[in-house]
Image (cartoon, rainbow, N blue to C red):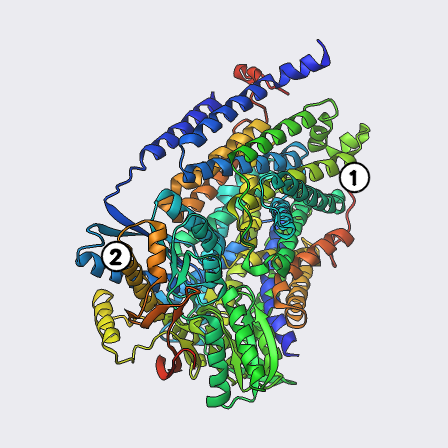
Amino acid sequence: MKAFSIRALVALCLAAALAACAKSTDEIRIGEFGSLTGGTATFGISTHEGVMLALDEINGAGGLLGKKVTVITEDNQSKPEESVTAVLKLIKQNEVSAVIGEVASSRSLAAAPQCQANGIPMLSPASTNPKVTEVGDYIFRACFIDPFQGSTMARFAVNHLHAKRVAILTDTKNDYSVGLTEFFKNTIKQLGVEIVAEESYSEGDIEFKAQLTAIKATNPDVVYTPGYYTECALIARQARELGLEAVFLGGDGWDSPKTVEIGGKAVEGTYITNHYSPEDQRPEVQKFLTDYRAKYNGKTPDAMAVLGYDAMQMMADAIRRAGSTDGAKIRDALATTYNFPGVSGRITMDPKRNAKKDIVVLQIRNGQFHFVESIPPDA
Amino acid sequence: MSGAAYVARRNAPLLVALVALGLLGLGLTRWLNGYYLQIVVLIGINVILAASLNLINGITGQFSLGHAGFLAIGAYSSAATTLFIGLSSTAALPLALLVGGCAAALAGLAVGIPTLRLRGDYLAIATLGFGEIIRVVILNTDAVGGARGLGGIPILAGFGSVYICAALCLVMLWRLVYSQRGTAFFAIREDEVAAAAMGIDTTRYKILAFTVGAFWAGVAGGLLAHFIGYLHTNSFTFLRSVEIVVMVVLGGLGSLTGCALAAAILTILPELLRFGAEYRMVIYALLLIAIMLTRPSGLMGGRELSWRSWSSTPAR
Amino acid sequence: MQQLVNGLAWGSIYALIALGYTMVYGVLRLINFAHGDVYMVGAMAAFYLAHWLGFATAPSLPGFIIVMVLSMIVCALLGALIERAAYRPLRRQPRWAMLTTAIGISMLLEYGGQALFGADPKFFPQLIESAPAFRIADAVVTNIDLLIFTVSLLLMLGLRWFVYRTRTGMALRAVSVNYDAAALMGINVDTIIALTFMIGSALAAAAGAMVGLRNPKIDPLMGLMPGIKAFVAAVLGGIGNFPGAVAGGLLMGVCETLVAAYISSTYRDAVAFVILIAVLLVRPAGLFGTVSVEKV
């Protein structure tokens, strides 16, 4: 009977799938999840490239604890609910010892509880929203956090750019943007400058003229747009079409090779806060630039690639110091990371499992991100 | 033969199958790892979803495309119950599920009543609209996380709870539909005007179908919320409604066993096709089109799996 | 005022897509779920054509027009193909069968598009550099917006001429009124229906190409929301009614923009659904539709 044979087919498939999951235990498995496709694809791809470069170096030097290291990568399509599925698969099916991911704070926040609940240490290379590490003591990050980022840009706008009228355009669909807006606003208010307009949009929107028209009517000097590069570049374009000439300010979400590609002339002059600048003359940065360009056809790495590389190296360093792949031991080793020589700066874990690092301000001039200034933490 | 014995005899195959599967499942949980267990649980949830939609679409003939909306309401309201009341023991689950189910049932009522007058295409679009409105409202409700999703839901549901709910759902629907009064549902599907002319209170049965269907979708939502521990409105779009519709259509509109089977197949299929991740949904779409072009009556052809069907006579 | 201009630009787009929905519903009583995805294919086709024909590096107005017309032809063929392969065999089946197949085609186009073009968004080349064309009050009307208004108007007038002034157009109207009678009158219903799909798809493709120019981010799932909104617009105007579709589209575009501007941008998409429910509950025939009574 039809129903019967279909049942049999199903049973066969299940059996086959079960049989196919042979696992080897003579390698160290680290999971990576990120947005390899979707609206923030360059984040995931850049991070992945950084991680892979680090992996090559680690395995080239003999691996970790005498074993080869493999990285298993899952794509979450730039969606938070897919992050949960991806991480569950890494933990339950691939049985990884640790997880590296993600760039977008919303998606890290979605996956973190699962890592915490399963005792698997998670190291986010670039999620800057403070809530991510608050999920639990197994969650770490290799970058600075948004209170620092938001207030830095606010001070830069007021002190350096002498802005008197500030407009804000937030992506309410994501924690990163909402968080940054809040910290930026607080500092702006402390400095006594007027916020003339606050508008919002959602990640994935393509039409912003309604909000931009409202902003234009208030005549701002600067527009703070702490979102992700696809929307930000489109926003800049549409703003210029409407005749809005204010300078754009943004966060590290703007950092992508696609920003200038999409935004063209409209994004010229924009200032952003970021994790590193390719113009940094420190030897670690220059060596990384050379290696990266050699592996990836002369491409200049963006901040996500750098942080992906640093995160992987930090993880390797932690596993070496822990001397085992036990989750709790790796966790303890990560927590005691001190003065780790990362490409993005010397990294020390603070008690809240966030990294204490410098922040840089960059400006887009002639289609490239150029260094403006560097600010140390606790400035 | 007496009423009870008749009922028992008619339902015997289904009951036997349910108990057997339950025992098999319990055995499986012993040595299946987390990933496969997850699939089994998802099958259970999808069975509930497919069956509940089948009541509305297949049995009563009301082509509803908004089922994901009921799922969403059930998921979010049950999550809100455990989160905001602060319960986290497994005993809290039935309460959360009940809340989820009832909230969804209310939504079912809210959707069923205004759409009473609508037929066919218009009904489909109206239900689609309601499903999307529900999703957008939840998306804009910051109290439940809004656009950033709702996380940290205590993980209370597992194979046991899902199986019990699925079994209860199927049994309840079976009893409802294959009873004397239950023929009214089929009558409305076949020809609503004629049914009304025969004295059937079409309003009552249509609303009943929506409410009960929505209730179980809500329960499924509660189970989902307490199994994954994270909710995002992106999981409750029109696409989700369509996925459930595909299950019902594949199994055969109107066949409860059919849609349960189809739910199982269509939960496993995407996982098997994970290697060709990009082509996964393409195959899904082709499957749907193929079914419609070749055998729109689905796997079971609108009939139930019973001893009778082995000899090809329709059970109903 | 600027908001009005923004709204009308989108409104024209919705109107073009809505016309396709209305035409198909008129002849087949089918809500072609796949129509929004034909719009997407139009945008994608225009994107690839612009690159292959070299216009991406040599931007010009005639270049855009050529690309748009070619993508219209591509989609017309696609529309005819879909009709022939998926809808024609199901004409005698219950309505939900065709509806479900339409959903299937829609998914096939979306996910096939993702597999074929990649799920990442693509950025339409700037075939025409955006520049302010003229100002009304304090509103800026860009040259692209002007192009959209002009092209849409021309296409709509062309359609009107075709439907009301040609024999084929008359045949189309006949099939809309009564399928069987038209067949009995010697009209080749199959050809008419195929033609309907082709015209509708071509209009959607034009809309897609123009949206690509105006809002350059295009991806395989871009047709979903505009498709639903255009459908609502068609219902609002009275499904089966051509001027209604246009009016509905423009109204929809303006309402949506005003809600995004003055209430909240996150409710932008919800506007369509609220309008839909309101129309279906209050006046299902739409603004310009004829109220019909079901005879038993």
Q: Answer yes or no: is residue A173 visible.
A: yes
Do discs 2 and 1 belong to a common subunit?
Answer: no
Name the amino acid, label 2: Arg
- Tell me where residue A293 appears, x and y as whole percent: 23, 70
- Residue A295 is left or right of residue A247, and the answer is left
Please say if B96 is above or below C23: above
Question: C156 or A227: nearer the eye?
Answer: A227
- Tell me where residue A218 appears, x and y as whole percent: 62, 84
Q: Write down the residue under mark 1.
A: C295
Looking at the image, is mark 2 or mark 1 nearer the viewer? Answer: 2
Q: Quadrant of the N terminus of chain B?
A: top right
The residue at 30%/70% (across/down) is: A339
Question: C281 or C153: nearer the eye?
Answer: C281
- Tell me where residue C24 appears, x and y as whole percent: 60, 50
Please say if A57 is above or below A341: above
- Tell me where residue C97 appears, x and y as whole percent: 58, 38
The residue at 76%/47% (across/down) is: B114
Give the residue at the far bottom of this rendering: A162
Name the amino acid, label 1: Lys
Chain letter of the residue beneath label 2 in the structure image:
A
The dot on residue A320 is: 2
What is the secondary structure assignment of the residue under circle 2? Answer: helix
Please say if A316 is above or below A274: above
Chain letter of the residue beneath label 1 in the structure image:
C
Quote the CA–CA distance across marks 2 and 1.
81 Å
